[in-house]
Amino acid sequence: MPPLTRSSFTPLKRLKESDHGGQNSGIYLVRNAHTHRTAIEKRLPRSAVARGLAAREARAMQQCAHPNIIRLLFFDPDCKRTGYASLFLPRCELGSLDRLTANFATRRCEIPEGWLWKVLWDVALALCYLQRGVDARESAQLGRPIGRAEKAAGWNGIAHRDVKPANIFLTWNGGHADARYPTAVLADFGGCISLSDMAAKPPQEAKELSLWTRAFEPPEAPRFSDASDAYSLALGVHCMALLREVPCEDKVLLRERPVGAGGRYSGFLEGVLRRCLREGWRERPDAAYLPYLVWREMERAAGWAKGRGERGAAAFARLPEWAFE
């Protein structure tokens, strides 16, 4: 297959207008002339190129090769002719996690607990990989957490810093889809920062590069740690459980009852979320430990559900087709 260029992609339609913060100039559906498959073009303004944000976002994706992290198909930083740079990405055909949650909210239906666990598991694996460059799937399933010093040789650790349902996309084509649930894929690295980015910037300037979405930012923002993204992930799962667009503003209530009252979801799920939502980042599971914790508690929840008859089966039921409309 010949190498990809900007001309390899034909624009079909605009999917999203420019964002209010000016970090992109619109999202477009395009067609890859080589594969004839649809893809996504994220256009970035000249200001993002001049500030180094476009290159930073591209570098992060180029570094990654993980089924729960969006791939970069091609990056064109040259905005002289078009007025914008472009990131070309695979299209996740099932849309975003916030849209799925909205579909359940419209029908006033409870999201199965099994799907909440699947999102937690998939994104936990993505966050661990970003920080350590290792896939923790097998070690977590064997009951062994990734050690604090365990990291791929030469790995340039990455903090995503904008984990939220709108930045998690869904596909049946992912490597970790199963019969009931699709693969969750972490996308939009516009707010990410790596160790090398931090080293190249003065501390205050690096801190100001943070692009957290306010409703999903951790208490330490704009500072961050290897447990900050876990906090944002837990907020996203909290939103799914309560069918909310944004997290509860009452932080005390949020930390005490992240899945709401009434026993709709298991204590195992609530326990993981409560640990991730602790105010102090040192008290939370970091990205390396999170996959082990999620797998262990997910297995316990599945065993608990098996003993609850029809109600337990419903907790781990398949998602309905209308969830992806």
Image (tube, rainbow, N blue to C red):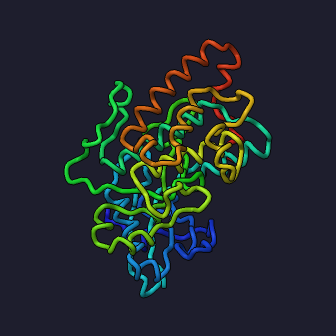
Q: Which sits in the foreground, 321 or 9?
A: 321
Q: Position of residue 120 (x, y in %)?
A: 52, 39
Instruction: Give above or below for 136 relative to 68.
Output: above
Residue 206 higher or lower than 280, as above or below: below
Q: Residue furthest bottom?
A: 80
Residue drawn at x 60%, y 33% as measured from the top left: 270
If the image is split into quadrants, where does the N terminus sit? bottom left
Q: How many marks?
A: 0
Q: Say left or right for 55 vs 166.
A: left
- Does any portion of residue 18 appear in the rendered image? no
Indicate left or right for 87 with 105 as reference: left
| Residue located at (34% from left, 61% from top) | 194
Q: Where's residue 191, x and y in %?
A: 46, 64
Residue 252 % position (x, y): 65, 45
**Residue closer to the observer: 204 or 4:** 204
Q: Position of residue 324 (x, y in %)?
A: 66, 45
- Can you see residue 289? yes
229 is higher (above) or lower (below) than 87: above
Residue sitting at x 38%, y 63%: 193
Which residue is at the far left? Answer: 153
| Residue shown at the point (47%, 67%) measured from the top left | 210
